[in-house]
Amino acid sequence: MRLTWPDNKKFAFTIVDDTDMSTVFNTKPVYDLLLNLGIRTTKTVWIYPSRDKFTGGCLSDNDYMTFILWLRDNDFEIAFHGAGSGDFKRQEIILSLEIFNQIIGYYPKLHVNHANNLDGIYWGQKRFSLPLKIIYKLLFLNGLKFSGENIDSSYFWGDICKHHVKYIRNRIYTNINTLKYDPYMPYKEVEKELYSNYWFSSSDGYDVNTFCSLMKTEDIDRLSEEGGCCIAYTHFGSGFVDEYGKLSQKFKENIEYLSSKNAWFAPASEILDYMLENKGSDEYLSALNSFKMDAIWFVERVYRKLFMKE
């Protein structure tokens, strides 16, 4: 059933920007543009500095914290990307959420698991159903054992996640209309219900080139015609601003075109809340629908690996 969006808007749009590689210098120009265009979105944060190869600002850095508070004060949603990049154990994660609440003024409503962090909640092969669960473990994990939901693990924080976090991102697709590939979101999963609440999908705009490819004018027009919803997942720290502080011209053109459309622009949790309210009751993802979504994800992933030279 086609959703009716608030205020007679034709479609819904948001962005979840993960904090990897993000600095004030390479990210704030993007948000200056979004703010000027009236596009409110979601930005994830780390609390502590990175402990591995990933770079990016965190709330422990005063300049970056000031930037994040500026976003909050301008009605952007601040979400959680873990305590930091690398291995953080239970007590550190719990403390990081308290620091988040103390600084931001609320606990994160939305969480995105980060890369190889072992505290990932239902991460790795546990994201998927059979048979993709087995295939993913063999092809992609390299022995990593994610255990954020394992009560016997030193990385366990599932009980805290269940209490504070309402939405967790899972699958990513290449279609601009996220809702077309995942018409069930936000949904629950029986096997993951003990330590999670609702799950959602997103559309892949990983870096500036991927984002601009996702957001071509004809695709934006199609999203509008379909009355759909795009939850674009990206890293604004990855090429959107050059070494001289100049914003990507192609990105600027695409976003300005998007802003001219009759769209509902809101942070991810606000859009997901609206979808949930319109369902009227909780929806559990069936095994068949999970398999269908996994199959699409896998085919797209293989195609991109073979033909798009990721």
Image (cartoon, rainbow, N blue to C red):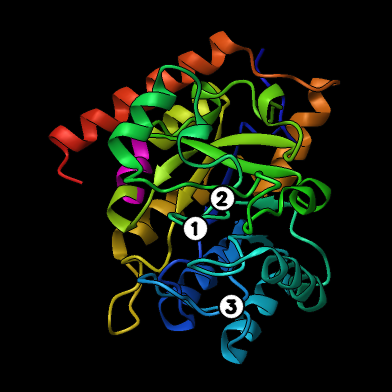
Q: Earlier in the sequence, mark 3 or mark 1?
A: 3
**Which three-letter amino acid code belongs to the residue tagged 2?**
Gly
Q: How many marks?
A: 3
| Res 283 seen here | yes
User: Please, what secondary structure does the residue beneath circle 2 have?
Assistant: loop
* Residue 162 counted in the magenta span: no
Left/right placement of residue 7 relative to residue 121 reads: right
- Give the farthest residue toward the top: 288
- Identify the image quadrant of residue 190: top right
Q: Residue at x 51, y 58 (%)?
A: 17
Q: CA distance from mark 3 to mark 1?
A: 13 Å
Magenta residues span: 211-218
The residue that mark 1 highlights is 117
**Which three-letter amino acid code belongs to the residue tagged 1?**
Asn
User: Please, what secondary structure does the residue beneath circle 3 have?
Assistant: loop
**What is the crowding at mark 2: few (fewer than 14 residues within 10 Å), some, or many (at least 20)?**
many
Q: Earlier in the sequence, mark 3 or mark 2?
A: 3
Residue 173 rendering spot, x and y as whole percentages: 41, 33
Q: CA distance from mark 3 to mark 2?
A: 16 Å
Q: Which mark is residue 48?
A: 3
**What is the crowding at mark 1: few (fewer than 14 residues within 10 Å), some, or many (at least 20)?**
many
* Residue 216 counted in the magenta span: yes
Are the residues flagged by discs 2 and 1 in contact, CB closer than 8 Å?
yes
The residue that mark 2 highlights is 120
Instruction: Name above or below for residue 152 compared with residue 248.
Output: above
Choose mark 3 or mark 1, whichever is in front.
1
